[in-house]
Image (cartoon, rainbow, N blue to C red):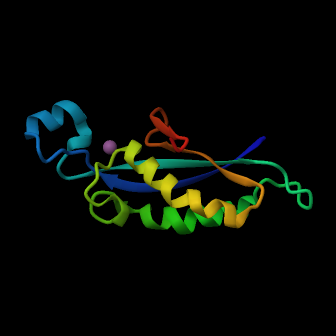
Amino acid sequence: MIYVSRQEHFNAAHKLYNPDWSREKNYEVFGPCANENWHGHNYDLIVTVKGYTDPETGFVIDLKKLSNLIKTEVIEKLDHKNLNLDVSFMKGKMASTEILVKEIWSILEPKIPPITSFGQLHSVKLYETPRNYVEYLGE
Ligand code: NI
């Protein structure tokens, strides 16, 4: 089994705020991410496909096709957007990296086999900061 990854980048704004809690509790739990007037992150997204090599190309997946898929289905919907307000699949959800990475998985997972017969989605890793990242393997 071979693992092939593509990294993409986007910027987005969000806040982490539970409307059922007081302002004080939101700041206590979420710290500066609770700022009512939003803040931004530079996100790095790493998508990994696992599989076997196509005997005709030697590829598990054509990384140009994977890059185009990630850009069309994910990056264009998130880049320079407000995750809480602008992104349809995040409506009504907490704009945490954990929730976002699961949503990205749900979007990409069914679209990987059509662009490769030899691979399937293995993981989606999302860096919110260079030191904080979340990885989802679909379960
Ligand atoms: Ni934040």
Answer left or right for 118 relative to 47: right
Residue 99 or residue 114, whichever sits in front: 114
Give how far across and how far down residue 99 sits, in percent: 38, 47
Instruction: Answer above or below: position of 71 versus 31.
Output: below
Give how far across and how far down residue 119 sits, in percent: 73, 53
Considering the image in quadrants, where does the N terminus appear?
Answer: top right
Instruction: Answer above or below: position of 38 versus 21.
Output: below
Give how far across and how far down residue 122 sits, in percent: 63, 45
Residue 21 or residue 32, whichever sits in front: 21
Q: Residue sitting at 52 percent across and 66 percent down?
A: 73
Q: Residue sitting at 50 percent across and 60 percent down?
A: 107
Q: Which residue lies most toward the right here?
A: 56
Q: Which residue lies most toward the front here?
A: 139
Answer left or right for 43 relative to 124: left
Ligand 1 positioned in quadrant: top left
Instruction: Answer above or below: position of 75 versus 129.
Output: below
Q: Residue sitting at 57 percent across and 56 percent down?
A: 109
Give how far across and how far down residue 101 sits, in percent: 46, 48
Q: Residue sitting at 55 percent across and 69 percent down?
A: 72
Residue 40 or residue 96, whichever sits in front: 96
Answer left or right for 18 relative to 72: left
Task: Answer with the quarter of the image where residue 11 lies.
Answer: bottom left
Q: How many marks?
A: 0
